């Protein structure tokens, strides 16, 4: 697979993830939230705080999509192993870790404020671990891309 086609595939996948995010954050979450609000009126007071909390989690998700788009563009331009991509992957790592901490802390705070169910907290642990895994993978990729960029730079100087 050529770098141009890989870049196009990556951009298509990122675009699909963006559409899925719009469906999730714009339709599914509010509909499920309203349904829960109607089903459990004793928790209706928690609807707006939860919606704000979830919509805030969308911001870093879309920031990662933008960073991913830039990485895909640089791959298409034959600049796969560059310091810029290493920095971008490091930013993804930081965003994923920060989002995981925010998501877990928010769930704990909502539990303490009696706006959360313990079962939801347990499910949020799974989401938190996924975020931590993404953060670790991005940090490792960042390190490897940085090393590859350095090797490529040295190789370019010897030719």
Image (cartoon, rainbow, N blue to C red):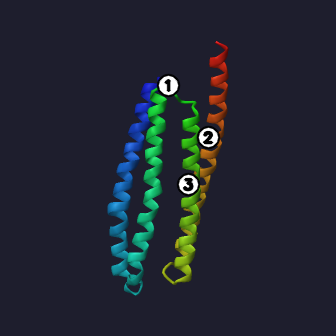
Q: Name the N-terminal-most of marks 1 and 3.
A: 1
Give the left or right position of residue 1, taking residue 89 as reference: left
Quick check: can you spot residue 56?
yes
Q: CA distance from mark 2 to mark 1?
A: 17 Å
Give the residue at x 51% y 84%. 114
Mark 1 secondary-structure assignment: loop
- The residue singled out by tag 3 in the image is 96
- The residue singled out by tag 2 in the image is 142
Please state which of residues 41 and 54 is positioned toward the viewer in this rendering.
54
Mark 2 secondary-structure assignment: helix
Q: Name the N-terminal-most of marks 2 and 1.
A: 1
Q: CA distance from mark 1 to mark 3?
A: 26 Å
Image-quadrant location for residue 36: bottom left
Please state which of residues 117 and 74 is positioned toward the viewer in this rendering.
74
Mark 3 secondary-structure assignment: helix
Estimate how packed mark 3 is, as few (under 14), some (14 to 19) or many (20 or more) residues with alpha carbons within 10 Å: many
- The residue singled out by tag 1 in the image is 78
* Image spot of residue 49 (x, y percent): 42, 76
Q: Quadrant of the C terminus?
A: top right
Above/below status of 131 relative to 72: below
* Image spot of residue 157 (x, y percent): 65, 17
Quick check: can you spot residue 130?
no
Proximity of marks 2 and 3: CB atoms separated by less than 8 Å: no
* Image spot of residue 92 (x, y percent): 54, 48
Above/below status of 70 relative to 46: above
């Amino acid at each position: 697979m050529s770098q141009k086609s890989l870049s196009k595939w990556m951009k298509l996948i990122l675009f699909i993830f963006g559409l899925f995010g719009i469906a999730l954050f714009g339709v599914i979450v509010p509909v499920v939230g309203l349904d829960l609000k109607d089903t459990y009126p004793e928790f209706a007071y928690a609807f707006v705080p939860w919606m704000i909390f979830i919509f805030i989690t969308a911001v870093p998700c879309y920031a990662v999509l933008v960073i991913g788009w830039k990485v895909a563009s640089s791959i298409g331009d034959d600049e796969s192993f560059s310091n810029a991509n290493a920095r971008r992957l490091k930013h993804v790592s930081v965003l994923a870790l920060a989002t995981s901490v925010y998501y877990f802390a928010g769930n704990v705070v909502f539990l303490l404020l009696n706006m959360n169910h313990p079962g939801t907290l347990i499910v949020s642990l799974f989401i938190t671990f996924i975020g931590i895994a993404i953060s670790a993978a991005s940090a490792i990729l960042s390190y490897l891309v940085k090393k590859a960029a350095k090797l490529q730079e040295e190789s370019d100087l010897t030719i």
